[in-house]
Image (tube, rainbow, N blue to C red):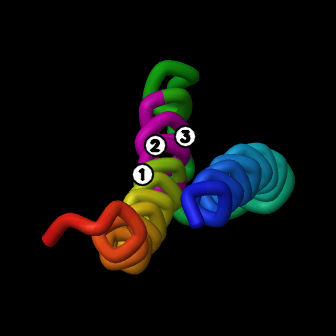
Amino acid sequence: MVLEGIVKYLTATIILLFSLALGWLVSAKYLEPVILKAFNPETHEKYLDIWFTVFVLIELAILSGYTLYIYRVYMSNKHLTKSSSGRS
């Protein structure tokens, strides 16, 4: 029972790391032309500010989804630990 919960957490962590890497690769390939076309930053500093802001928003969205998933796993395993320990 507890092992199932640990496996779920490890799976979620692997998915998180994969999602973060995939988000970085996708943003590096597809997001740069969009930023250059939409915002047309004149200075290098402004371009880096826009790039960083968009990248942080992508990573925050991924982390929020991960947190929600972990919360759901915790809530689904909560009843398993209560019933298996014999306490209420």
Taking 21 as reference, is 34 left or right? left
**Which of marks 2 and 3 precedes in the sequence?**
3
Residue 24 point in image, percent of width and height:
73, 45
2 or 1: mark nearer the eye: 1
Q: Are marks 2 and 1 in contact (CB under 8 Å)?
A: yes
Question: Which residue is denoted by mark 3 in the rendering?
Answer: 51
Residue 88 appears in the figure: yes
Question: How far apart are the two marked residues, 2 and 1, measured between alpha carbons?
Answer: 6 Å
- For residue 64, above or below residue 52: below
Task: Tell me the amino acid under the disc marked 3.
Answer: Trp
Few, some or many residues within 10 Å of mark 2 (<14, 14–19, 20+): few
Q: Is residue 83 magenta?
A: no
Residue 24 appears in the figure: no
Residue 49 point in image, percent of width and height:
43, 31
Mark 1, secondary structure of its residue = helix
Q: Which residues are magenta?
A: 49-58
Q: Is residue 57 magenta?
A: yes
The structure residue drawn at horizontal position 44% and vertical position 62%, both measured from the top left corner, is 70
Task: Tell me the amino acid under the disc marked 1.
Answer: Leu
Question: How far apart are the two marked residues, 3 and 1, measured between alpha carbons?
Answer: 14 Å
Few, some or many residues within 10 Å of mark 3 (<14, 14–19, 20+): some
Q: Residue 38 or 53: which is nearer the viewer?
A: 53
Mark 2, secondary structure of its residue = helix
Task: State whether the magenta stretch is mostly helix, strand or loop.
Answer: helix
Q: Quadrant of residue 5?
A: bottom right
Question: Which residue is denoted by mark 1 in the rendering?
Answer: 60
- For residue 81, above or below residue 19: below
Residue 60 point in image, percent of width and height:
42, 51
Extreme-top residue of the structure: 45
The structure residue drawn at horizontal position 79% and vertical position 51%, both measured from the top left corner, is 18
Question: Which residue is denoted by mark 2 in the rendering?
Answer: 56
